């Protein structure tokens, strides 16, 4: 079993959402913020705010959840974020 996270990054205006999965959340979020991969979706659309995440003990379960969320309508994703982070704050703001 490998600890892993499914997460959503948003741009400044919360108009673009990216859903991802990782086994190293702080490291991966920092890579998004620093545009480590300049041609990536998050770099192109400036998705630099971590607005939602959930932890899993099994990477396969996390990957399945990521796939599920990627198939959700945008309104459903927004509702999930608002349920846990109503102000759409950057949850990683004080990590670095």
Image: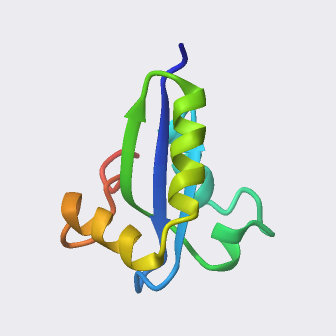
Residue 32, by quadrant, is bottom right
Q: Residue at x 67, y 63 (%)?
A: 35
Where residue 12 appears, x then y in whole percent?
Answer: 43, 81
Visible in this render: residue 81? Answer: yes
- The residue furthest top is 1
Where residue 1 appears, x then y in whole percent?
Answer: 53, 13
Q: Residue at x 40, y 68 (%)?
A: 77
Q: Residue at x 52, y 50 (%)?
A: 29
Residue 14, by quadrant, is bottom left
Colouring scheme, one of rainbow, by chain, secondary structure, one colour: rainbow
Where residue 18 appears, x then y in whole percent?
Answer: 56, 66
Q: Total of numbered circles in the picture? A: 0
Nearer to me, 60 or 88: 60
Residue 80, by quadrant, is bottom left
Q: Residue at x 21, y 57 (%)?
A: 84
Visible in this render: residue 89? Answer: no
Q: Is residue 7 above or below residue 46?
A: above
Nearer to me, 35 or 41: 41
Q: Is residue 3 above or below residue 62?
A: above
């Amino acid at each position: 079993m490998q600890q892993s996270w499914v997460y959503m990054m948003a741009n400044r205006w919360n108009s673009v959402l990216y859903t991802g999965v990782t086994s190293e959340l702080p490291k991966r979020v920092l890579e998004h913020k620093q545009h480590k991969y300049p041609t990536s979706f998050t770099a192109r659309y400036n998705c630099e705010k971590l607005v939602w995440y959930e932890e899993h003990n099994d990477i396969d379960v996390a990957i399945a959840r990521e796939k599920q969320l990627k198939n959700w309508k945008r309104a459903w994703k927004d509702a999930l974020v608002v349920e846990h982070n109503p102000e759409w704050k950057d949850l990683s703001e004080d990590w670095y």
